[in-house]
Amino acid sequence: MGEKMENRKRAKAVSLSLRLDAKHKFALEFIARVRDQKLTTVVERAIKDLASTVLVESDGRAYRWLDYWDPHPGIRQVKLFALGGLETNYEEDERKAFIMTHRRFFLRETDAPSGPLVHEERTRVLWRRIDEFASRWEEGRSTEPYGVGVTMNEELRRARLAEVEWPPETRENTSSE
C-alpha cells in the first residue's frame, strides 16, 4: 500500500535536462547534501519558491502562477489566454483566436473577482478534439463561420452537457469569424 501512495504523489513526472557549469552543479549537490534531499527535490522547491514571487499584471489584476495552473492541459491553456498578461507565440496566437472566438464554449458567462472563469466540464470534453475543431475553423471560417460551434455543441450533447447558444445573436464576440 505504501508503494501505491508513493506512486500517486509523483504521478506524471516529466524529465528535464539542463546544462550547468561546474560551480552551479556543485552548489546544487551541496544544497542536496546539506538538506539530505534528492537533486530533484532541491530543484522543485527552488522553482516553486521563485515562482511564488512572480506576478503577472493584466487588466488591473495581479496573477501568480497558481492562478494559471491546472493539471488539465486544456483548462490551463484557456486560463493562459483568458487571464492574459503573457506573451504568446504564433501557434498560441492561432489557438487563442479560436478559443476567444468560441469563448462561450470555454468560459463561464460571468467572471469572478479574480478574473474569467473557465467552464471546466465543457473544456475537458471539447479538448479531446481541440486540434480538429481549430483546424476546421481555420479552414472554413470565411465560408462556414459557425460550423465548428455546431459540431462542438453536438459533442457537448453526447457528453450530456448543456449546449451553448450558438450561433451568437450578435457578432460582437466573433468579429474575427
Image (spheres, rainbow, N blue to C red):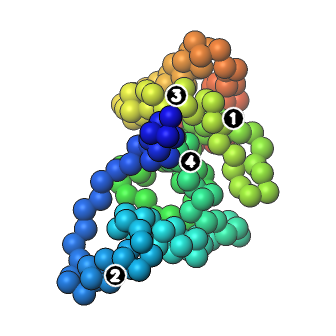
Q: Name the residue under label 2.
A: 30
Disc 3 from disc 2: Cα separation? 47 Å
Q: Mark 1 or mark 2: which comes first in sequence?
A: 2
**Type of the residue with mark 2:** Phe
**Type of the residue with mark 1:** Thr
Q: Which tag is nearer the camera, tag 1 or tag 3?
A: 3
Disc 3 from disc 4: Cα separation? 16 Å
Disc 4 from disc 1: Cα separation? 32 Å
Q: Mark 2 or mark 4: which comes first in sequence?
A: 2
Disc 2 from disc 4: Cα separation? 33 Å
Q: Mark 1 or mark 3: which comes first in sequence?
A: 3
Q: Mark 3 or mark 2: which comes first in sequence?
A: 2
**Type of the residue with mark 4:** Asp
Nearer to me, 74 or 104:
74
* Residue 163 image point, x, y percent: 67, 20
Disc 1 from disc 2: Cα separation? 62 Å
Nearer to me, 143 or 16:
16
Q: What element carries label 4?
A: loop
* Residue 154 image point, x, y percent: 56, 15
Q: Mark 4 points at which residue?
A: 70
Q: Which tag is nearer the camera, tag 2 or tag 4?
A: 2
Q: Mark 3 or mark 4: which comes first in sequence?
A: 4
**Type of the residue with mark 3:** Leu
Q: Mark 3 points at which residue?
A: 126
Q: Do the residues labelled 1 and 3 touch (CB within 8 Å)?
A: no
Q: What element carries label 1?
A: loop
Tell me the residue at 55%/31% (across/down): 124
